[in-house]
Structures are given as structure tokens and as C-alpha cells.
Amino acid sequence: MYKLLIADDEQIEIDALRAIVNKGIDSILDIQEAVNGREAIVKSQTYLPDIVFLDIKMPGIDGIEAARTIRENSPSVSIVFLTAFNQFEFAQEAIQIGVDDFIIKPSSETRVLEVINKILTKIKNQRNEENKKKDNELKLSRVTGYMENEFLYNLAVTGITEDKFANYLDILDMNFFSGKAGIVKILYETYPIHVDSSNQKKVLMKRVAYIIKSKLSEYGFVTLFNKELSNLYFFPIMERQSNLDSEKSDALNLSQLLALEIEKTLSIKVVIGIGSSFNDPIKSLKSFAQAKAMLGKITDKSLNLDSNHLEVTFPLNLEIDMEQAILNGNRENTIKTLQKIREWLDTTGSEFDIKKKAILELVTVLKHAAAYQLPNGKCIVDESDLKNASGSIALLSGFNIFLNELLEQIASAKEIENSPAIESACLYIDTNYLKDITLEETANHCRLSSFYFSKLFKKEKGITFIDYLTEKRISKAKNLLITSNLSIKEISANTGYRNPNYFTKVFKKMESVSPSTYRNNKMLKQQ
């Protein structure tokens, strides 16, 4: 688990230390040695020890100089000086280097084990903190990706209010001056290697998104994505006013520039539609409609594709109307929109396979939208009739069956909204708020998807899960500040906050004063 390097010019000292460690420390599985400072420096770079024992007085490069070099190369390594002299002679240099401890030679077994155990405890704590930090970063990354998907979905499909728009930007820690809509249709059939699995498509979509993000950042854009829909939706944002060349920011030029960059990097063709720039969030739907219309205008000739690759773009207004009807559980509007889709299919001069593909893409969009409304976050509907349809009548019949099943699932979900799930969640929070609980854990406790739980919690309680949890913790903290003599650090730990500084920040945000000031004010009032 841990590695120790012992550097001493006296082999008898090395052997004695090795024997003590082997006998008393079972978590150190590997020990290496060096006979001088130079060898210690070299081995520390290749062996990468967790702890280095350095004799101060060695020929050539001594322990002090070796420690200084090792510390520069490996800032996190723990260093212990071995010395036959009084340690205070080297105290100032040791402090500057950041030495962990001294062992006076000849060293006792008790002292060696005491020093090593103290250092190992420190290393374990550091590793635990690093693992926790990585875990939190991973959680934050997942939440950020989830928020991006949801944000783009609202911008492109359902529309968004200014308040909701501002909330998303606040959560994502972004400013907004202007933005424009973008949609990428990836032509997987043009990739040199056959692409047939959904996982392969996801990987390619992520690579396309990375190229777009990198290229647009050169022009000052910060770009958000939704990678969950059948096409890749993106939203380039200017966080402040820019002097970007109008030619480069022009939708068509930008579209062509990105398509060429993707083809050059990935050897795959794409069609990109980009809408007009907007400052008002309400205009996002219009910009995405323009982006989708632009997709339809790019011909097979401009892409140098054969007739088998011709695409038909489903009308965005019908997609939105159908989605709204389904999500609202409105059967009447669903039937009306289905009739409009039937008319569109009849008047579209495309082959059946292309029309079928457009309907199947709409099915994917509807399933994705419905999943956000369903308790388990999944929309499972039998699509076999649709996929096996060989004519327009069978296709519409299968689509009608699909819509009915979707409406039934939405209706069932609305019944669940009246269940005691949120009360169960509140009880879980009340019982566990002193622990490091998360929205995901609480949602799992209620057997609901995170998104659905978050939406339902806000609807039932009028505040978000995080706000509810914070209020519960701060309420407990206020009580402890008044009724106990616990320190701020202790109260922080007793109310679910491991970091006292973060606790103080949250408390001040909630109560407008620090915990110490709050306690002092209450004590003054009681006198």
C-alpha cells in the first residue's frame, strides 16, 4: 500500500530501520534503500516513495540538499530526517523544506513506529480528501451535463422564461450577452467504419461536440450541448459583447466552417444548421427553428452524397405541438397533431424509408421528453410495429399505438404525483440531514429518477431539495449556537457540513450574519 525509501551511508542503520518497519508496520509493503543523497534523489523520481528517511550527514549531497531537491520534484512526499545531532541545529532549514519529523540516531523502535504511524495517518487522510474531491468533481460533472441537456431541451423544444433562463445560467456559473441555436445531424453512414450500435453513435457524437466546443472557443463562444436527442443540439454563448468578425459569425459560414473541421478531424460528414443570434431568451425557439430549417436547405449536392443519403427534416412546429400534447396528457391535441403529421407525410415527396426514418426520429424525441416526466426516468414502449412497418398505413397505425401507450404512462405518472413519495423524502432528510446526503440518494430512496424527484419536490414543497436541506441544517445550527457551548467547527460537523468555512458561508447567506455574530447577538438579547 505504501512505499518507503531509506537513505543512509551506514548499512547497519538501514538494516535496523528495515527490521523495525517490517515487524511493526504491515501497510508498508515495499522498502528500498540509497547510500547517499544523489542516489536518494534518483530513486525518489523512479520509485515514487510515500515516505523518505534521509540521514542528514551523508558524503557528497547531504540529506538537507537531497530533501530540498526531492521536495521540489515530489511536493507531496513525506520526509523524515535521521540525525545523530541535536535536531534544532537544522530546524530552520527543515521548516523551509517542509520536513515532517526528526529521528535521533540510534533510533528506538517506539520512536520509529510513532513517526511512521503519524505520517501514514496524514497520508490516509490526504488520500481520503483527494478521493472525496474527485468524487465530488465527478458528481458535479454529471450534474452539469444533466443541466446542460435539460437547459438545451427547454431552449429548443418547450421554450423558456427569462427567470428560468437566468436560473440555469446561475447554476452553470455563466454570463449571457447573446447566443444562437445550432443543430448537427451526423451522417453516420459516411464514416469509414460501419456504425451500427447506439454506443458507437454516442462516442462519435461526443467527439463532434468536442470539436465544435474547441473551434467555437477560438471565437470567444462558450458552448453548451444536449447529446440525448437524435441530433446534437448546441448553444454557443457570448458572455460579453464581442468584436467577432461578422463574416465568421454568419450562420452559413459558421456552419460550413464547423462541418469542414469535423470532416477533416473525424472523416465523417455532418449537416449543421445555425439560427440567428438573440439576446432575449424567449427568442430561442425561433433561433432553433431557423437552425432546423437550415438543415433542410443543405442539399445532397453540397455534401457530395448519393441519393441514398437524402434526408427529410421533420417540421419543428409539429414536433413541438406533439410533444406539448403528450407531456400535458392532452389526448385531443395529440389526435389533432397526428392528423397534421398524416397530411405532411402525404404531401412530402420522399420515399417511404425516408419518411419512416423521420417518424422514428420523432419517436426518439418524444420518448426522451416523456422520460423526464416519468418516475423512473425511463420511457419503455414497444416500437416493433413502427420499426417493422412496410407502408404508410402500417407506419401511422404503429405511431398511433405508440402515442396511446405514451399517454397512458404520462397519465399514470400524474397519479403518482399525488402519492406520499415527497413526504417519505422529507422524513428521510429529517433523519439523515447530518450526513452527506445527496439528491440522487434521496431520489433512489423514493424509487424515483433524479429529474422527476427534483421536479416533484419543488412542486410539492415550493422550494428545491437543496434549499429544503439547507434550511433544515441551518435551523439545527441556530439552535446549537444558542443552546450549546460547541465551537463553530463542532456545530458545522454536527449539522452535516464537513468544512467549517463552507458552513459559515452558507449560514451567512441564509441569515445575513456569521454564526459567531448570530450567537453573540442572541446572547446580548438574553442578558
Image: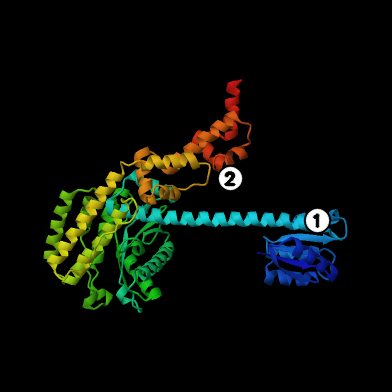
The label number, if any, that marks residue 495 in the structure image = none
Q: Residue furthest top?
A: 527
Alpha-carbon span between mark 2 and mark 1: 34 Å
Residue at left offset 60%, top offset 28%: 520
Residue at left offset 43%, top offset 53%: 143
**Secondary element at image label 2:** loop
Q: Which residue has dot 2 on it?
A: 499
Looking at the rendering, which quadrant does residue 419 occupy? top left
Residue at left offset 72%, top offset 71%: 43
Of 485 and 22, which appears nearest the observer?
Answer: 22
Residue 291 pos. (x, y %): 27, 61
Residue 363 pos. (x, y %): 24, 61
Residue 125 pos. (x, y %): 64, 54
Q: Is residue 317 in view from this perspective?
A: no
Q: Are marks 2 and 1 in contact (CB under 8 Å)?
A: no
Of 16 and 486, which appears nearest the observer?
Answer: 16
Q: Which residue has dot 1 on it?
A: 110
Q: How many other residues sit within 10 Å of disc 1, few (<14), some (14-19) or many (≥20)?
A: few
**Secondary element at image label 1:** helix
Residue type beneath disc 2: Asn
The disc, 2 or 1, on the residue closer to the chain's N-terminal end is 1
Q: Which is in the foreground here, disc 2 or disc 1? A: 1
Looking at the rendering, which quadrant does residue 97 occupy? bottom right
